[in-house]
Amino acid sequence: MVLKPVKSELGFTLLWTVTTFSGFLLSLLFVEIGEKADVGILQAAIGSSAIALPQSFLLRQRIFSKMWVLSTVFGWIVITAISVGAMGWIVSTSQFLPFRVVYGSVYAAIGGFVIGFFQWLAICPSVPSAWRWIFISSLSWAIAIPVGSVIGMLLYRLSRVFLGEIVGLAITWLLVAIITGINADKIFR
């Protein structure tokens, strides 16, 4: 029996989701989840490398994958430096639900836009409609951060264990992986 490469939309989306989420889990070995002030530029660079490197293997036949890694890392460094924060590893200190939703959506949209912009720089030479990636990234984070943050807050309130907030971040990364995976397949095809 010969295994053929997965070429279907569902296959790529599933691989992208597993790769991105696994990269997030790997990043937890190097990045401590904390509040905005706790996660610095070095942690953002290391964490984003843990995610971008496995993603680059999926993209290596479609784009110059080293640029993907560099642009992703640089995007995370920029959002951390401009005080948007390394949003994939930051837990909100607020327990006020509307604040988490509104604040999370706005900052995540900005952060996703910046990350998407830098990733666009890596994909634009090879992909005609690469500009769409900027908005996909922004939208995926704007959806995922509030959802994950609210779930994390509720789990924390129920359990009084910080692990609830970490589960919320994991849900955030899972949502980002699914949304970007569905759209990456369409853009990079």
Image (spheres, helix red, strand yellow):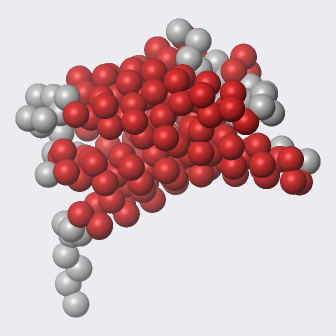
Q: Residue at x 72, y 16 (%)?
A: 37
Image quadrant where residue 8 sits? bottom left
In-front residue for pair 149/84 = 149
Q: Residue at x 22, y 90 (%)?
A: 1
Q: Can you name the residue that lies furthest to the top here?
A: 82
Q: Residue at x 49, y 50 (%)?
A: 175
Q: Can you name the residue that lies furthest to the bottom here?
A: 1
- Residue 29 x %, y %: 66, 43
Image quadrant where residue 136 sits? top left
In-front residue for pair 143/128 = 143
Position above or below: 89 against 44: below
Position above or below: 28 against 45: below
Position above or below: 103 against 37: below
Q: Residue at x 45, y 27 (%)?
A: 109
In-front residue for pair 103/48 = 103
Image side of residue 46 versus residue 63, left or right: right
Residue 153 visible in the snapshot = yes
Q: Can you name the residue that lies furthest to the front here?
A: 98
- Residue 116 x %, y %: 34, 28
Image side of residue 133 versus residue 159, left or right: left
